[in-house]
Amino acid sequence: MENAPTTQPTTGSTWQAKQVYAMAVISLVVGLAIGYLFRGSQSPPVPAPTAADSQASAQPNPHGMGGKMPSLEDMKQMADKKAAPLLEKLKSDPNNSDLLNQVGNVYERTHQFKEAADYYQKALQGDPKNVAIRTALASCLYYNGDVDGAISQLQQSLKYDPKDANTLFNLGMMKWQGKQDSKGAVATWQQLLKSNPQLSPDRKAAVQKVMADAQMQGKS
């Protein structure tokens, strides 16, 4: 959560494939920088591609993958396989927000951010006040290069829940890393801490850590 992407998205454009892949590889190890203080959603958990799936993709095969880290295409194939049962259910209930959200979760966890964003947007059409889905959508937009769109989604979330810790945390990260607005980021995190006094010590420490890093960067 404290680790910021080394390559920043550019507003109004998408990352090059190698940049997205590099981010994905790093994220598999340290977790997404634009992440969650609290992991959870209003939908039932969706089985994400497992380590075994990744290892299977890394096994020697006729196409010469060898022991390499799975590519974005490999991860896409894993996501498609995991999402298939959910997509089958959607055929008879295409506007089911819960199912659409679950499919979005599958693609988000395999770094297929464009596909995930598409499903999250469809899910929000039937459940526009769902802050958890909107926050996930914002993260996908951010990693797909649409920083302004991502921030707009988080600002919309705050209209429904001004105290939501995940929304405030991510908004601060996007202001800091996506807009180079250290002051705005710190102000957002201060709002987070003030409106969420129940934060556990470790989560509070995580927020304070990124605040300190942003303040130091602002001074330099």
Image: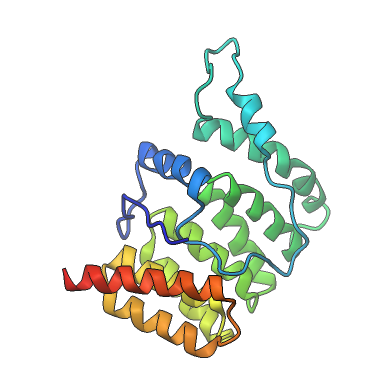
Q: Is residue 148 visible?
A: yes
Q: How many marks?
A: 0
Residue 47 screen position, x and y as percent: 74, 48
Of all residues, the one furthest to the left in this rendering is: 220
In the displayed structure, 8 sits above or below 98; it is above
Residue 208 screen position, x and y as percent: 41, 75
* Residue appearing at x 64%, y 70% in the figure: 125
Return the residue nearer the eye: 205 or 133.
Answer: 205
Residue 135 screen position, x and y as percent: 55, 69
In the displayed structure, 190 sits above or below 115; it is below
- Quadrant housing residue 176: bottom left
Residue 147 screen position, x and y as percent: 37, 64
Q: Is residue 96 visible?
A: no
Return the residue nearer the eye: 34 or 2.
Answer: 2
**Quadrant for the C terminus in the image:** bottom left
In the displayed structure, 210 sits above or below 79; it is below
- Quadrant housing residue 19: top left
68 horizontally vs 18: left or right: right
Of all residues, the one furthest to the top in this rendering is: 62
* Residue appearing at x 72%, y 41% in the figure: 82
* Residue appearing at x 53%, y 86% in the figure: 159
* Residue appearing at x 26%, y 67% in the figure: 180
Instruction: Identify the image's colour scheme: rainbow, by chain, secondary structure or one colour.
Output: rainbow
199 horizontally vs 170: left or right: right
